[in-house]
Image (cartoon, rainbow, N blue to C red):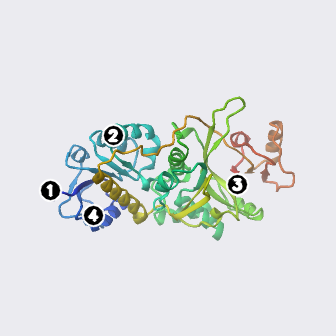
Amino acid sequence: MPSSPPEDGKVRVAMLGFGVVGGGVVELLKPYDRTIALTKVCVRDPSKSRDVDLPRTCEVVTDPHAILNDESIDIVVEVMGGTDSAWTYTEKALKSGKHIVTANKALISKYMDSIEQLALDQNVQFLYEAAVCGGIPIVNTALRGLRADTFNHISGIMNGSTNYILSRMEHEGVSYDEVIHDARRLGYLEADPSADLEGYDARSKICILARIGFGVTVSDESLLYTVGITHVSSRDFQYAKGRGYTIKLIAKAQLLPGDGDDDCRRLECWVSLALVPLTNTMASVSGPTNCVEVSTARVGPQWYIGAGAGRYPTANSVVSDVLEAVDNCNTGIGFPSPYGHRQLDCKVDEDVRAVAYARVDDKKTVSKALKEKGIEIEEDTPVDVIMTKGPVSLSQLRETSPVIVMPVLD
């Protein structure tokens, strides 16, 4: 039975999803109950026990349209996850003139341009700080704090689950399979962990940051060079340490000059395990922590380090966006693109060129194949290791059937 409507004058908020992050959102909204009313929450199973109490006047519904068709609701918070259903509901909410706050990086990356056009057409806000690196305010930093600057590159550790796994393999010498078991037990991995382990989660995040920083939309992120952590072993860490490196899952985006006579610049955007120098700030970032490095023309290199996931770090970003949306609504201003002022039409590379490390089962065969491709390699590496002397196509290197390939960062 619907509860009584909130008092007049309050901004009305509804939420799609009520899981771990949603529970945090409910808690963090409570101090603002004089100006913000959480009026509806949509869940799949209303009988499920929750560890957070909803406000007395908040109605629990199971049909998203009970929120989408409610003209009294001003802001919709989307924390349900997924892409297609989330897009259906987000699209309808935007068309209905509702502001959106979301933590859904996959949704944004897949429907980036459509979201922008709808938000501009309807003059509504689409806010998504929580979608990239949880509690680190990297979206607002890139959108507003560095608005007057020019981005050189954006890179970093953008998935806390895999960084936890790699950190334990490095510091404790435990096997990949053993750490995966612990990560599941501790809740760092979902029932289907492929988005984390294969690099898809980090890929969506770097695509969003590339849109903000460079103005380039990656229309199909599945075409980007993306290699996860599933083939890493203690042997890789052993060799990396001996050469002054550690291993991290890195996401990176940067603009490159055009090819030959083509003046059009290119976006290089990728996710891969990489050898990171021990002198690099990212090398010391351990556990389920994120680190984003931003290099700009005027400010130079910057590092943003903090919790990349979890109930309260993510919920804090969501609620901060809700508060911004409320403030902006009260000013009566027109709303800009959710991705900022930068717009650039350029080619998006599907490959990466870098100095590379490879672990191999048959060094003789792989070495021969590389030499036939004109790729020079170091001569004095161990029997299971190949290091290239200069930048190579990582896709070409992978065609020689190594066990694992990693770019080597400067």
Of badges 4 and 1, the one in the foreground is 1
Disc 2 marks which residue?
A: 91
Give the residue at mark 4: 49
Q: Position of residue 20 (x, y in %)?
A: 37, 61
Q: Do the residues labelled 2 and 4 touch (CB within 8 Å)?
A: no
- Mark 2 and mark 4: Cα distance apart in space: 30 Å
For the residue pair 358 and 350, the one nearer the viewer reads as 350
Horizontal side of 319 relative to 34 (left or right) equals right
Q: Where is residue 333 in the image (x, y as percent from the top left)?
A: 32, 47
Q: Report the Cα–Cα distance between label 4 and label 1.
A: 25 Å
Numbered disc in front, either 2 or 4: 2
Q: Which residue is drawn at 59% across and 60% down?
A: 302
Label 3 to label 2, Cα distance in Å? Answer: 40 Å
Mark 1 falls on what kind of element? loop
Q: What residue type is labelled 4?
A: Ser
Q: Is residue 306 left or right of residue 406?
A: left
- Say if mark 3 contacts mark 4, CB within 8 Å: no
The answer to whether residue 132 of the structure is visible from this angle is no
Q: The N terminus appears in which quarter of the rendering? A: bottom left
Q: Residue 146 placed where, x, y %?
A: 53, 54
- Marks 1 and 2, how far apart at CA: 25 Å
Q: Residue 32, located in which quarter of the rendered image?
A: bottom left
Image position of 16 (left or right of 105) = left
Nearer-N-terminus badge (1/2): 1
Q: Is mark 4 on a helix, strand or loop?
A: loop
Q: Tell me which numbered mark, 3 or 1, is placed earlier along the sequence.
A: 1
- Of the residues under marks 3 and 2, which one precedes in the sequence? 2
